[in-house]
Amino acid sequence: MSPRVDGRESRTGSASGPADGGRDREATLRLMIALGRAYRALERGVRRQLAERGLGLSEFAVLEALYHKGPMTLGEIRDRILVTGASTTYVVKKLEERGLVRRVAGSDDQRTVIGELTENGRALVADVFPDHVEELRRLMSDLSLADKHAATTLLRRLAEGASAHQ
């Protein structure tokens, strides 16, 4: 990639020319492997902590989204937690059976289903979320605050770039 005025490299070529293509491919694959391994390691730690509270990852993701964003359509929940529509419906139904979420018809369109937390759901998330954040902090304790900021910046840039190429 060639240097730009802002210090980053452009996407059109490399500073060393086309011969660097092999090294760039190798670095790209290594990054993908590192991202996957990091995600799996964090997921294993969080999964264990949530299981102690009787929650799976998808269940917690739905509860957490509704807790922080308020009532949402099932489609909005699906997009936020990155699972398929059928899986979202299944998870929301399970949470509803446990008295943590309720599904209501949309006011404008009766075909639209909105998920919202019940008082029990809100209380559970309020109880679990602080421990969840502390578990994430523990799992990421090898990174400094500056490392976390730098990683966040790079990963956001990666996501934006990848989205732009779709």
Image (cartoon, grey):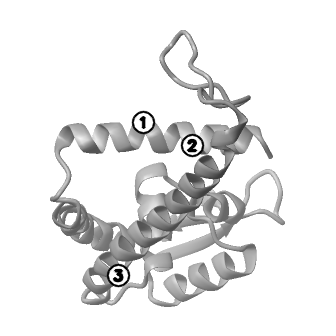
Local packing at callout 1 (Cα closer than 10 Å; few below 14, some 14-19, many 20+) is few
Please name the residue that numbered disc 3 is placed on: 44
User: Closer to the N terminus: mark 3 or mark 1?
Assistant: 3
Local packing at callout 3 (Cα closer than 10 Å; few below 14, some 14-19, many 20+) is few
Quarter that holds the N terminus? top right
Dot 1 lies on which element? helix
108, above or below 65, in the image: above
- Which residue is at a point 23% across and 60% down the rendered structure image? 140
User: Closer to the N terminus: mark 2 or mark 1?
Assistant: 1
Q: Position of residue 48 (x, y in %)?
A: 29, 86
- Which residue is at a point 54% across and 53% down the rendered structure image? 27
* Nearest the eye: 150 or 121: 150
Write down the quadrant of residue 51 in the picture: bottom left
Dot 2 lies on which element? helix
Please name the residue that numbered disc 1 is placed on: 153
Please name the residue that numbered disc 2 is placed on: 158
* Nearest the eye: 72 or 84: 84
Write down the quadrant of residue 76 in the picture: bottom right
Q: What amino acid does circle 2 point to?
A: Leu
Q: What amino acid does circle 3 point to?
A: Arg
Local packing at callout 2 (Cα closer than 10 Å; few below 14, some 14-19, many 20+) is few
- Which residue is at a point 34% across and 71% down the rendered structure image? 42
Dot 3 lies on which element? helix
